[in-house]
Amino acid sequence: PQTPDHSVAMATKNELRFPVLSDVRGAVIERYGLRYEVNADARKLFETAGNDLADYNAEGGWTLPAAATFVVSRDGIVRYAHVRGDWRERAEPADVIAVLRSSR
């Protein structure tokens, strides 16, 4: 849900070579069932660390997407999905690359 300007800055900083999109109203993360509101305790932690989500998010809210990785083919079929409730559990890059290679 971050603003397009913040998305572009992040893509530039990390030298990403693919398009990065912004979901300014959170509609996509809502449809995927990944949208959650940051609770008051977590918000205090973010603010203490100097992370003001309201500044980064286009709607000025405290909404984040759950950590998820999807590989969607050009014909719109989801070929791989990795979604976990714990943000620390991320997809293994080797698994994603294997799916990408097999989808050619």
Image (spheres, rainbow, N blue to C red):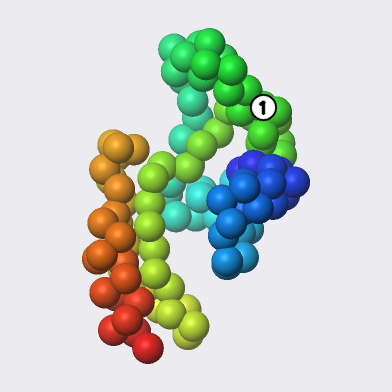
Neighbourhood count class around disc 1 (C-alpha, 10 Å): few under 14, some 14–19, many 20 upward: few
Q: Position of residue 72 (x, y in %)?
A: 43, 73
Question: Farthest residue in the right direction?
Answer: 5
Query: Residue 95 in the image: x percent, y percent?
Result: 24, 66
**Where does the image place residue 99, in percent across and percent down from the top left?**
29, 75
Q: Residue at the spot x=69%, y=46% of the render?
A: 9
Could you tell me if residue 40 is visible in this image? no
Relative to 74, residue 70 above or below? above
Task: Please state the horizontal and vertical placement of residue 58, each as a whole percent of the image.
Answer: 71, 39
Residue at 41 percent of width and 42 percent of height:
66
Q: Quadrant of the N terminus?
A: top right
Residue at 30% across, 60% down:
93
Q: Is residue 25 left or right of residue 96?
A: right
Which residue position holds label 1? 54
Amino acid type at circle 1 is: Ala
Query: Residue most toward the bottom?
Result: 104
Q: Nearer the viewer, residue 81 or 14?
A: 14
Q: Tell me, yes or no, if residue 68 can be seen here.
A: yes
Q: Secondary structure at mark 1?
A: helix
Q: Is residue 78 left or right of residue 5?
A: left
Quarter of the image holding residue 102? Answer: bottom left
